[in-house]
Amino acid sequence: DREAFLDRARRARLTWLSNPNNPTGELLPFDYVEALAGVTPGILVLDEAYYEMSGVTGLPLIDRMPNVVVVRTLSKAFGLAGARVGYALAGPAISGALRRVRPPGSISVVSAALAVQSLADLSGMRDRAERIKTERTRLQRELGSLGFEARESAANFMLVRAGRQLAPVLLRSGLVVRTFPAASPLADFIRVTVRRPEENDRLIDALKMAPRPGEVAAS
């Protein structure tokens, strides 16, 4: 509930917004993010871990709203999940505070070297991000044609309403998907990662033989 979130932000010292959201992939529009930054008396952290796949950022807000911080990671589009490298973008006051509390040696020499190397190849990263977006569109279309509800996503994954019986079926085909607890609002969904075309084709082929939501899987 976006209005409820805005209301809670009015009383918050720190508001953290993942945009796009994980695990839904939902992307909130810039005007909503701007409104959120305007109503909160505290700091607004915009987690843009999937920015390279969404193309929408709150970065322009920093110049006129000193309470906004944008955090990003090199774990996704740059493929450096094991290196654990990220960065924050903020105005002078918050940047200075972060520098004062950052411990020495917060990342390893190896991770720093990998980050520098990756950042030197922005064109390669952008090419990978474009391929992911192309495959994301194709995968959503293919899953929809098979009768599955594949939610629109601005990240490198998507939610698919598949029923709780589908994950074990896919596992028997060597495909691992993320599931959610039975009490979760997402209990009937799985989260699938958008991968290379041939890997996405494996998922599509497996789903062609899989039970649809409401059907009973064969034992």
Image (cartoon, grey):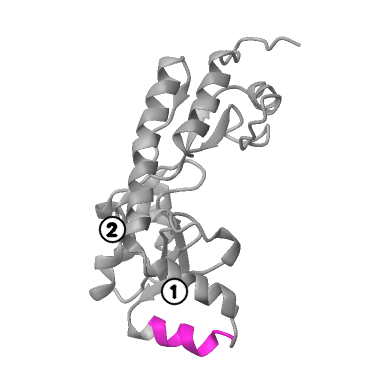
Which amino acid does the dot numbered 2 rest on?
Ala
Residue 195 highlighted magenta (yes or no): no
Q: What stretch is highlighted in magenta?
A: 94-103
Give the residue displayed 64% in from the left and 36% down from the top. 180
In-front residue for pair 68/7? 68
Does 23 sit left or right of 65 as displayed?
A: right
The residue pinned by badge 1 equals 116
Helix or strand or loop: what does disc 2 sit on? helix
Residue 151 locus on image (x, y percent) = 42, 31
Give the residue displayed 62% in from the left and 10% down from the top. 215
Residue 92 locus on image (x, y percent) = 34, 85
Give the residue displayed 61% in from the left and 31% down from the top. 187
In-front residue for pair 104/115? 115
For the residues bearing labels 1 and 2, Cβ distance under 8 angstroms: no
Does 18 sit left or right of 177 as displayed?
A: left
In-front residue for pair 202/29? 202
